[in-house]
Amino acid sequence: MTQVALLGITGRAGSRIAAELLQRGHTVTGIARDARKAAAQPGLTLQSADATSVDALVPLLRAHDVLVSATRFDGGSDAATLIAAARQAGVPRLVVVGGAGSLEVAPGQALLDAPGFPDAYKPEAAAGRVFLQTLRAEPALDWTFLSPSALFEPGERTGKFRIGGDQLLADAAGNSRISMEDYAIALVDEIEQPRHTRQRFTVGY
């Protein structure tokens, strides 16, 4: 059983990650700006806090094995804040719900920079790329950044998906997608059996 602190538990991805963790018997401290929006469950402790504040996070993170961040990049917690909070609280591992924008669609070209990438998503995708760059420059903390496929929506929990590296995954028809439920499986698998220490990886159909 792993003690997991989960930032963003009230979000779409965060709530599904919490469900997967709890189903597998892990203990979860769910943290959000207003944690009252999350439903109480056995094995789940809810805490309201500002995830952009190191001082607010540190007391809540102590005695946890893993910190999972499922918050937004644009206007949410930045990498420096989470790294500092994890270090000060003694949490050895950070797992981040990443974005697809920084995945490569051609050698040296990120999806974010490809023609037709929606303007509405560019601020979040750009902030996610900076977050990943900051993690890659971090010398000591054990981190993992899991990027979903391009279409990342609630859906079915099938347990059938592919794992990739820095390249965007797509199926035979050219569709790049993963359900949040299957994404949660891949993320919790990584917590239980780390295979991407200090790496980014991706998951898709």
Image: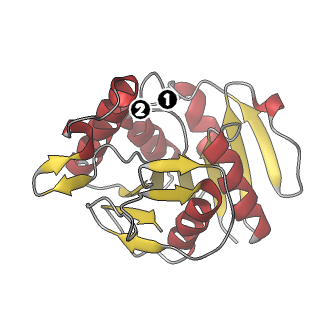
Q: Callout 1: 10 Å neighbours few (<14), some, many (20+)? A: some
Q: Quadrant of residue 57?
A: top right
Residue drawn at (41%, 72%) of the image: 163
Q: In what element is the residue under mark 1?
A: helix
Q: Quadrant of residue 133?
A: top left
Give how far across and how far down residue 117 sits, in percent.
30, 35
Task: Give the CA separation, mark 1 to mark 2.
Answer: 6 Å
Q: Is residue 48 left or right of residue 40?
A: left
Q: Name, please, the residue furthest toward the front.
A: 173
Give how far across and how far down residue 48 sits, in percent.
72, 29
Looking at the rendering, in which quadrant would you find the N terminus?
A: bottom right
* Residue indicated by mark 1: 54
Give how far across and how far down residue 73 sits, in percent.
43, 32
Q: Say if 204 sits above or below 78 in the image.
A: below
* Residue indicated by mark 2: 81
Mark number for residue 6?
none
